[in-house]
Image (cartoon, rainbow, N blue to C red):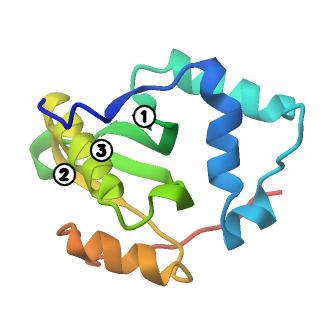
Amino acid sequence: MQQDASISFRPATRDDLEIIVALLANDDLGQTRETLQETLPSSYIEAFAAIDRDPANEVIIGIDINGIFGTMQLTYIPNLTFEGATRCLIEGVRVSDRVQGLGLGRKMFEWGIERAREKGCKTVQLTSNKARDRALAFYEKLGFEASHVGFKLYLD
């Protein structure tokens, strides 16, 4: 997979977790649901460990000359639909304010879509909160179609 020499993408490690959580917390919605403090709550550490153990999940980070600029989680889901095709779910996407508008988010998605192809996926899907107008427009520019209606049920 060819990419710009000044940027790279790789699976995250435990050492990246504090920066990832800071990215997740750095928007209006993230501020209401993430806990950003000097010592990370153990729930983040436990969740990352579970993701890291699971071969069907990857947290990916984007790195430029200034460090980590973005993150996304890729989950590979085997399905019976579409003749047993595997799909890739992209979630937890964040790109640092410092690189907004520079095309790095697009490059991160291009990398993630190519990764899904490498894993044999036939579909890439994502969800986004309706309040994220800029993100929704961005996903449409990338070729994603708002083809389904999604629902969530928050459990206690």
Q: Which mark is residue 65?
A: 1
List the residue tagged with mark 3.
88
Q: Residues within 10 Å of mark 2 (few under 14, many from 20)?
A: some
Quadrant, the N terminus: top left
Taking the spot 89% from the left edge, 36% from the top edge, the residue there is 38
Determine whether the residue tagged by mark 1 lies in a helix, strand or loop.
Answer: loop
The nearer-to-camera label among 3 and 1 is 1
Name the element at disc 2.
Answer: strand
C-alpha gap between disc 2 and disc 3? 6 Å
Q: Which residue does the image show at 54% across and 20% down from the upper left?
A: 52
Nearer-N-terminus badge (3/1): 1
Q: CA distance from mark 3 to mark 1?
A: 29 Å
Above or below for 155 versus 148: above
Expressed as whole percent of the image width and height from the top left, the position of residue 65 reads 42, 34
Question: Which residue is nearer to you in this view: 52 or 24?
Answer: 24
Residue 123 is labelled as 2
Q: Which amino acid does the dot numbered 1 rest on?
A: Ile
Mark 3 and mark 1 in contact? Answer it, CB < 8 Å.
no
Type of the residue with mark 2: Thr
Dot 2 and dot 3 residues touching (CB under 8 Å):
yes
